[in-house]
Every structure is written in C-alpha cells, then in structure tokens.
Image (tube, rainbow, N blue to C red):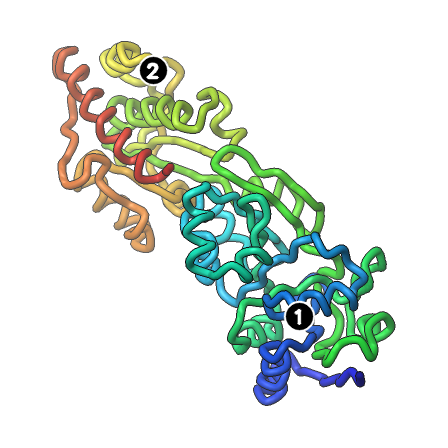
Amino acid sequence: METKRITINIENLDSDAIKEAASIVDSGGLVAFPTETVYGIAARVKNNTLSKLNIVKGRPKNKHYTLHIADNNDVLKYVPNIPLRTRKLIQNAWPGPLTIVFALEPDEVNIQQTTLGKETFSVLYKDGTIGVRCPDNPVATALLKEIKCAVVAPSANISNQPPAINADQVLEQLDGKIDMVLDAGQCQFRKSSTVVRIDNRVIEILREGAYSKMELDMLSQIKVLFVCTGNTCRSPMAEGVFKKYLAEKLNFKVDELEQMGYKVSSAGIIGSSGHPATPEAVAACASQGVDIGNHRNQGLTRELIEESDFIFTMEKIHLLRTLMLTPDAKNRCLLLAGNKEILDPIGQPQRIYDNCVKIITKAVKERISELIT
C-alpha cells in the first residue's frame, strides 16, 4: 500500500481533499489527521476495519477505542443523559484536548444497544461506559463532519511508541500501512488529551494530558446564585436550604459542596454588604436543620451574575434588576418558585418567616430535582 500525503492549509481548507479522506474512511480505509494534541488515525466503527487498525498499531483486540465527534451536540446520540457538571465541562472544554468517559445507567445501555446496533455498540461501549473526544482543530472538525459513519481515532503511532505530532512522524511509523495522511503541520499541544471520568460527585483523571486537575475543576464547577432585595432573609434562606438538599441529593456533606464542584451563594439588589441574616431568618432556617448564622450580605454585581450558571430570584423585580445589569443572563435567570413570587417577610412575625422558609424549601427541592437527575 502507498500512503498518500496531502498538505492542508488550516486557514484555507481544501474541501476536495477532505472529501477524499472522508470517502476513504467511509469505505473502510485508514486516514491520519491532525488534532490539537497529536495526530490520530480515523477509522470507521466496523469490526473488519478495526481489526485492520489493530494490526497496523499492534494493539490488543480487547482494548476499546474512543469515539471522535465533530460537534459537542453529537455526544447526545451516544450519551442521552449527561450529568450537570459534565454538561458544564463540555460547554467549557469542548472542542478541546479532553476525552470524557461517560458511565451509563443499565436502562440507558439497553436503549443504546438497540438504537445503535450490536456491532457499533460492542465497539464503543465497555462495561456500560463510552469514551468520547471532540477535537479542536479545523482539519479534524471538517473531516469528522464529512465522514458519514461513527469514527474512532487512536493516536497515529505503533503501540508503545511516542505519539506523532506531525506528518513526518506519522510516516516514520506508518508509511505503507495506512491509506492517507492529511498534513497540516505540527500539533498545538504536542501531547495526548487528558482522559477523565466524571459524574455528579467527582472528576477522576484516568490519564494526564493537556488539562490539569485544577483546570478541570474550574471548568466544571457549577455556580448557583439566589437574589432578593437586601440579602438578609429570603436569598440567604434559599442559599442555606439549597446547600442542605443538594448535599443530600449528592450524598455528601454541606461543607464539601465547593470542594466537590458546587458553589452556592446569594446577593441583594440594594447593594449593601457585611450585615448578618435577620434573627427571624436564622431561626426559621434552624427549624429546618439549616444554619445561616455566619451569613453576611453582599450586593448583586455583574461579576456575580456573569459567573453564575443558574440564578434564582424571589420576585420579578429582582429578575428585572439582574437582567438590567447583565441582559445576557436571560436564559440563566428564573423565579425560584416558578411563576410565583416569594414575598418579603421583613418586619413580619416569626410565623411569616417560618412559612416563607417552607415555601422556599418546596421550590428549592423542585429546582434540585430539575438540575440533578
């Protein structure tokens, strides 16, 4: 076999060359192409093609390959239900040098087997998990979009040899063994992607690479903000109650929430800061097993809004004020209790506060059930 080498300008992609490469892959051939990490070998998800790929790479037959996709949304075809933190990580880190191993529930596994077919399922899934990569390289994206079948793309090298970071290194190991190499120069990161397994509780790094653990923790952190008027009663009550029930839902302690990737805070639209929660709010929360005695209020800022994934307000005026500061937050900002407003208990008897925290608790439980399945 003669390996065809085509030079590609990433600033002006040759669509004919991309189509030719895609046609080779769809027909069962092997094409090396650049990603932002290392060069990979594109191969269709068919047993006969992967048997050939195993021989070319000298790779064990029982080792599973990682699915490669052109667009973030393509993952939903293979992983129908994605946990909240993973959705945040995908939003921030894909396309990019990150491979995510998703764990599916048994009923989801059965659905995927039926939907995708036995051959595709057996190649891509192992013990109820699937590894997926969305590379950040114009050539990779164009090629994966053009290929009509599911694609895996292990590194373009012989097993146990260094991954290739340019076309010359690909050909040093694989010349005459693959059909084509798309030569777009040297890869950006020049090392393999980070591989992680993530659920609602923790990120587990399976292979170190371009992303560090600290970077992944930051990219996947979920930030929830509650907003009221003065941030001394309703929003701190909502913050405390939310922390309690979120921790229960995820099966860890309240003081572990931020360490495990969830930051919950509150703010007030009037802008004052440093004041404690009202005694009535503290007592109302204590009756629900929630401690907000150390709370100090803060004013709502653009920075708080912009960094938050979910913003829940008590009244429409709070929602409007939030959107006045940051109009782009429209899709992230909602009334906590659906279409109902939670009225201000300030200056009212303790029983009004007690009733208010019950309303907040009901609304918080519903919101958590929406966010964490």
Q: Which residue is identified by label 1?
A: 49
Q: Quadrant of the C terminus?
A: top left
Q: Nearer the viewer, mark 1 or mark 2?
A: 1
Q: Residue at x 54, y 29 (%)?
A: 259
Q: Residue at x 67, y 43 (%)?
A: 206
Q: Residue at x 30, y 11 (%)?
A: 286
245 or 231, nearer to the observer: 245
Compared across the picture, whether 165 is left or right of 35 comes to right
Compared across the picture, whether 189 is left or right of 197 comes to right
Report which quarter residue 16 is drawn in: bottom right
User: Is 345 above or below relative to 139?
Assistant: above
Q: Could you say which disc has been placed on residue 37 in the image?
A: none
Q: Mark 1 or mark 2: name the one nearer the start of the chain.
A: 1
Q: Neighbour class for label 1 at 10 Å: few (<14), some, many (≥20)? A: some
User: Is 211 above or below relative to 8?
Assistant: above
SS for dot 2: loop
Residue 284 image position (x, y, % from top left): 24, 13
Q: Could you say which disc has been placed on residue 290 in the image?
A: 2
Residue 249 image position (x, y, % from top left): 39, 27
Question: In the image, what residue type sits under mark 2?
Answer: Val
Question: In the image, what residue type sits under mark 1?
Answer: Thr
152 or 170, nearer to the observer: 152
Residue 348 image position (x, y, % from top left): 12, 16
Compared across the picture, whether 98 is left or right of 183 comes to left
> For the residues marked 1 and 2, what is the alpha-carbon distance in whole angstroms?
58 Å
User: Is 16 above or below relative to 137?
Assistant: below
